[in-house]
Every structure is written in C-alpha cells, then in structure tokens.
Image: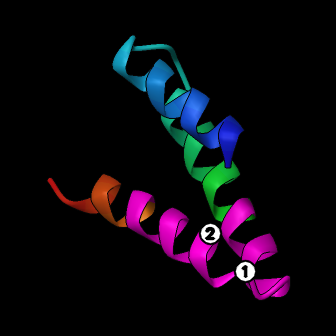
Amino acid sequence: MLLGEIYLKRTQQNQPDAEAIATQFLTESLEIYRDLDLQEKTAEVDAILLLRRVP
C-alpha cells in the first residue's frame, strides 16, 4: 500500500503514469490484504480507492 500512496502523491505533481501505477499498487495491495483476511487494511485501501473514483 505504501507504494500506492507514494504514487498518489506523485499524481499531485503531474508525473506521467503515476495515477495508473498508484491504482495498480493499491489494487494489488487490496487483493493481498483480502487473501490474508486483514480486514482493517482492506477497509483502508478500499477507502483510498473509493475516494479516487469520486470526482
């Protein structure tokens, strides 16, 4: 998830492909947390991804 947050920060600096990379890292983190049944972390990443979808 940390890499996703780093790339989210880079999107604010208009770095190319940062948004796509952030989404990829966050989505992969979400899958890992779900597989490990880490509900608190799953909810945290879900919230970040949800906020990114809201215009």
Instruction: List x then y, in percent, for residue 24.
Output: 66, 52
Local packing at callout 2 (Cα closer than 10 Å; few below 14, some 14-19, many 20+) is some
The residue where tag 2 is placed is 41
Which residue is depicted at the point 62% across and 69% down? 41
Q: Is residue 34 above or below residue 41?
A: below
User: Please, what secondary structure does the residue beneath circle 1 have?
Assistant: loop
Instruction: List x then y, in percent, for residue 36.
Output: 85, 82
Q: Quadrant of residue 5?
A: top right
The boundaries of the magenta stretch are 29-48
| Residue type, mark 1 in image | Leu
Classify residue 10 as left or right of residue 53. right
Is 35 one of the magenta-colored residues?
yes
Which residue is depicted at the point 81% across and 72% down? 32
Q: Is residue 35 above or below residue 16?
A: below
As drawn, the residue found furthest toward the left would be: 55
The residue where tag 1 is placed is 38
